[in-house]
Image: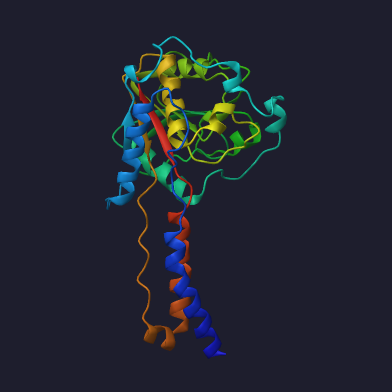
């Protein structure tokens, strides 16, 4: 009856603000990669500062830039050992990726954030040639507001690549077995993307060297990741690191692979959505359906605000 409905509504509405306040923290600063400890500390401070500020709508916030003296060794050296890049499952990756997965590996808000960042990054250029490494059935590129030229996918599963309507061409290739991109000439692309897959690379040095080679001068490499992965296929040091540590790992891949003009870590998660104003007691009593609509919207906002983080490490050639 209406009285029971109102009671349930009031109970539900009273819980929703608490659900928002208990949203998980987006970063942990305990442990992680320690080779450039000072840079890690500065980045963590930037994260916590951002969480307290009221930001305008934008697609990214700089965490830090990486400089040469942040790293233990010079460009051209390699500090990692086999154990760092070992995996729980070292069987052939073609077996793992044999069956197509027409699913997304990050939540909707993270995807929206990535697409918004791409739009900001590419909107000022014309006929942007893009190489999407570790590509799949969706590349998250914007469908409007950018002028795309050639969009090439390199991935493991042909069915997924064939279904990707944003690609103009594609290649099936296991980058852990064949990390070279010899099918592409030097300085062929304006942008190289790698979405939530850098943690699976067992030969990152060779791949990042190739990314640098195929980029045009002034071109950008955009390596994005969240906090999800297939843990049996991620490399050991990735599983042992927190978010700041993972940003540092990717930054080090850039540094040791080539001389980049700049390397920058970015938090690209869009600002928190505003929870709609809760209807008053009188409105709830007179119009229970409006209260249900508010509860549904507020719940969706709370879910979006507590969802997957989204980071990019950007290298400019």
Give the answer, above or below, for where 73 lies relative to 234.
Answer: above
| Residue drawn at (52%, 20%) of the image | 204
Q: Is residue 131 visible?
A: yes
In the rendered picture of this protein, how many numbered marks are placed on residues? Answer: 0
Can you say whether 40 is above or below 259 in the image? below
Q: Residue furthest top?
A: 76
Where does the image place residue 8, in percent across and percent down from the top left? 53, 80
Query: Image quadrant of residue 212?
Result: top left
Q: Position of residue 76 (x, y in %)?
A: 43, 9
Residue 35, position in %: x, y? 42, 22
Quadrant of the image for the N terminus? Answer: bottom right
Colouring used for the render: rainbow
Q: Judge left or right: residue 158 versus residue 57.
A: right
For the question of whether residue 146 can be seen, the reply is: no
- Which quarter of the rendering shows the C terminus? top left
Which image quarter: residue 59? Answer: top left
> Observer-nearest residue: 84 or 154?
84
What residue do we see at 65% from left, 35% from top? 159
Task: Locate residue 93: give its quadrant.
Answer: top right
Compared with 45, 33 (above or below) is above
């Amino acid at each position: 009856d209406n009285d029971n409905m109102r009671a349930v509504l009031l109970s539900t509405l009273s819980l929703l603000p608490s659900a928002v306040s208990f949203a998980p923290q987006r970063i942990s600063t305990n442990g992680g990669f320690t080779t450039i400890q000072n840079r890690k500390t500065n980045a963590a401070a930037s994260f916590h500062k951002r969480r307290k500020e009221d930001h305008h709508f934008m697609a990214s916030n700089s965490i830090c830039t990486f400089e040469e003296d942040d790293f233990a060794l010079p460009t051209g050296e390699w500090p990692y050992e086999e154990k760092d890049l070992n995996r729980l499952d070292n069987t052939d990756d073609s077996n793992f990726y044999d069956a197509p997965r027409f699913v997304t590996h990050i939540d909707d808000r993270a995807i929206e954030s990535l697409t918004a960042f791409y739009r900001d990054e590419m909107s000022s250029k014309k006929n942007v040639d893009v190489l999407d490494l570790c590509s799949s059935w969706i590349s998250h590129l914007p469908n409007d507001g950018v002028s795309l030229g050639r969009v090439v996918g390199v991935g493991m599963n042909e069915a997924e690549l064939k279904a990707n309507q944003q690609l103009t061409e594609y290649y099936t290739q296991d980058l852990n077995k064949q990390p070279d991109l010899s099918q592409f000439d030097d300085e062929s692309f304006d942008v190289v993307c790698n979405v939530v897959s850098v943690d699976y690379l067992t030969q990152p040095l060779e791949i990042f060297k190739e990314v640098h080679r195929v980029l045009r001068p002034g071109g950008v490499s955009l390596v994005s990741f969240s906090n999800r992965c297939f843990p049996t296929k991620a490399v050991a040091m990735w599983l042992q690191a927190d978010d700041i540590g993972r940003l540092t790992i990717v930054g080090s891949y850039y540094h040791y692979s080539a001389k980049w003009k700049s390397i920058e870590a970015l938090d690209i998660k869009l600002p928190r959505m505003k929870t709609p104003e809760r209807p008053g007691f009188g409105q709830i009593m007179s119009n229970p359906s409006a209260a249900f609509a508010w509860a549904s919207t507020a719940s969706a906002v709370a879910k979006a605000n507590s969802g997957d983080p989204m980071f990019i490490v950007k290298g400019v050639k």
